[in-house]
Amino acid sequence: MIQFVKQLTNDQSRRLKAYERRVARINELETTMKALSDDEMRTYTETLKARLLDGKKVDDIAEEGFALVREASVRVLGMRHYDVQLIGGFALLEGNISEMPTGEGKTLVAALPSYVKALEGKGVHVITVNDYLARRDAEQIGKIHDFLGLTVGLNVPDIEADEKRSAYQADITYGVGTEFGFDYLRDNLVHKPEERVQRPFHFAIVDEVDSILIDEAKTPLIIAQKDRSHIRLKQLAQQIISEFEETDYEVDLESKSATFTEEGIVKIEELFAIDNLFSASHQVLYHYLVQALRANVLFELDVDYIVREDKIELIDLFTGRIMEGRSLSEGLHQALEAKEGVTITEENKTTAEITIQHYFRMYPLVGGMTGTAQTSRQEFLKTYNMDVVQVPTNRERQRVDHPDRIFMTTEQKYAAVTEKVAELHATGRPVLIGTTSIAQSEAISKHLKKKRIEHDVLNAKTVAQEADIIADAGQFGKVTIATNMAGRGTDITLDAKAKEAGGLFVIGTERHESKRVDNQLRGRSGRQGDPGATEFFVSLEDEIVKRYAAQKLERVEKKLKPSATGEVSSKDAIEIIEYAQTTIEGLGVSIRDYLFKLDDVLNEQRNIIYTIRNQAVNADADAITKNVLGMMRLALENSIDMHVSDELVPEEWPIDELKEDLRYLTMQEPTWSKDIADTRELKDALNDWMEAIIAATASRLEQDDIVLFAKESLLRAVDMKWTDHLTTMSGLKEGIGLRSYGQEDPSRQFGKEGLEIFEQTYINIARDVTTELCQLDRYFAEMAEEEV
């Protein structure tokens, strides 16, 4: 470990020295840039583009480009890039992560590499965590790009397709990360090339990169169609589970999973008068009972979701924000609706999905910005091939980070927080209290109200007032309670009196599942050399301790000697908190790695399906012909394999069933003229018959209208069977981790079984295409009748 740290330090030092030499050259160019007129600066942009077209690389013109952007920023925004911001820009340009503390101007940093890479004419995506930041950055930083002659687009939810298309055609496109991913999925559901909005991926800059690429990595992006089936069953499942006792199920808090005990299974079987809950005929019943159980014991109101206007709205546990437009799949969202007694919505049936990890790996180059990435450096390197560059601060940090204060109970912790706030408030020092949930923010608020301490509360219920609350949070005498949403993309500015009082004092009320999120909260204080302080108040009843350190606490609890106020200062208590957080962070890495391996299987399958689909959408006649003829041959050969085998003698083969299936596929009578001894001979005997059918179809595919028919047939079959495939794979993924394979890795078994399922899906697509192409005469006859 010591050797690793030394190597890391040396690598960082060498890289920073190289960047500093480049910054020195940019500073030498400053006089030249200042001498240019506004028109000459725009002309310089065209000159740089021309040099790239002549064979120069982006790195060759980067220093001039950075110098040009810095001067443009001075003229347009009155803001000059610090040298450390130039360093951050070079880290991004190389496809790495610029780790820069809050207040160091990451937004302005992104203007540098986005401009330079946009000169290649292939488009740059600048990705933020929410609509507000995307609009703000497009408006503010976009002025620099516009001044230099580049076009700027904005991609946010709920805009028309033409607006999206225009946004993607811009040199630089600002937007929300999830929306870029959803657009990719939607582009792979279109039937005409002109319906697509995106162009090929080139370069992306991801703000709050750890939030988007790591914290959100466990949740796939899903596009679904609606299905209103089984609503009564969902209500019945909720009614049954609400009457269950704790002996009827088991909950694993560490993995956040719930299963029925033997007692619970027996109870269900007796209620429904069935012999075996796990039989195939009761699969739907079991599925909805499990989802109802999960909804009741794993999801908590005002922590995981809120109820607003007869709807369940999910909360992002890492940001504290409402996840707009997002819902849980596989009936779990409807189980929550049944639990809370709100209107049960249509269930989502997945038609397209991709993980954040696989979406961003499609970009040839990705750079990222955040204040907290170093603790996840290995994961960034392994998953995205992105290194972390710790950029020096412009001014030395003055913030003081106090050690955690640990209490025995939650109530003792809240009492201590209240006393601390009262003490600080008496001096006028602004206070920001960070909480991990809406419920916790409301609990703290009640304590402050009892003390008559005026305060603002910022959580998912008060998001409409976010800008105003944050704008005031650094004012003298202000007290603000906020969920994690105050930890991302916001700058809390201090007034003069607040600085004199010691600056913003940040109080954390619970350790988060990730140290990075704790550090984001700390980073609200002490921006740009401002004074400030942070202190975390935690308890041994906190959720993170109950879930990940319960046994460790049980072993040492009797040795702990709390004070009269319940505070514990022993080394054992500190180790319990650290152990809990380290455990959940390690588990998080393992889960993301496991899910990544599972989705690797689906990603390979998705690439095959999307390649076939895009060839059809693009009306590539040669590819369509090759694909459908290959599918016809596969479908016919598979029919033979499905019905006969050499394990039986020919006399025992179900020949009538085989002939019926081949007639169904081809609308023709299969024939062969000699006795058959084995399957090889049967295939040889049927070969001429099959080849004649395929050749006839190939001949007809020389006509444009037949190619168009084949295209639509192919798209219909692919879309329907791929949707079914995703449902099947979701069920496999849900159960694969619970099955035991001895020493075998579940992800390998998932790959093995997933391949078998995909092969069958592909065969099903081939069969659908074959039946349609072999019924062309009937199709055109019906068309003619309709015209008459």
Image (cartoon, rainbow, N blue to C red):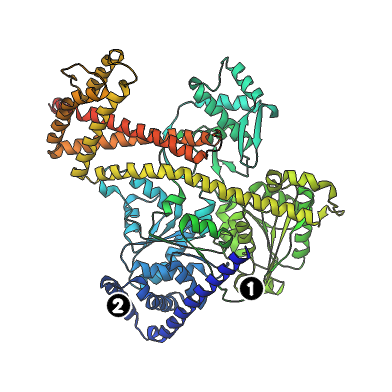
Q: Residues within 10 Å of mark 1 (few under 14, many from 20)?
A: some
- Residue furthest right in the image: 564
Q: Give percent across and percent down for residue 528.
A: 59, 73
Q: Give percent across and percent down for residue 742.
A: 56, 35
The quadrant of the rendering that contains the N terminus is: bottom right
The amino acid pointed to by label 1 is Arg
Q: Secondary structure at mark 1?
A: loop
Residue 316 shows up from this direction: no
| Between 295 and 356, the one nearer to me in the picture | 356
- Which residue is labeled 1 in the image? 397
- Residue furthest top in the image: 651
Residue at 85% over, 52% down: 561
- Tell me which label, 2 or 1, sits earlier in the chain: 2
The amino acid pointed to by label 2 is Thr
- Which residue is labeled 2 in the image? 43
Q: Give percent across and percent down for residue 302.
A: 63, 44
Labelled pair 2, 1 in contact (Cβ < 8 Å): no
Nearest-to-viewer mark from 2 and 1: 1
Looking at the picture, does residue 170 appear above or below residue 747? below
| Between 490 and 679, the one nearer to me in the picture | 679
Residue 777 shows up from this direction: yes
To which quarter of the image does residue 636 belong? top left
**The label number, if any, that marks residue 590 in the structure image:** none
Q: Secondary structure at mark 2?
A: helix
Query: Taking 780 as reference, is 655 left or right?
Result: right
Label 2 and label 1: CA atoms lie apart by 40 Å
To which quarter of the image does residue 704 belong? top left
The quadrant of the rendering that contains the C terminus is: top left
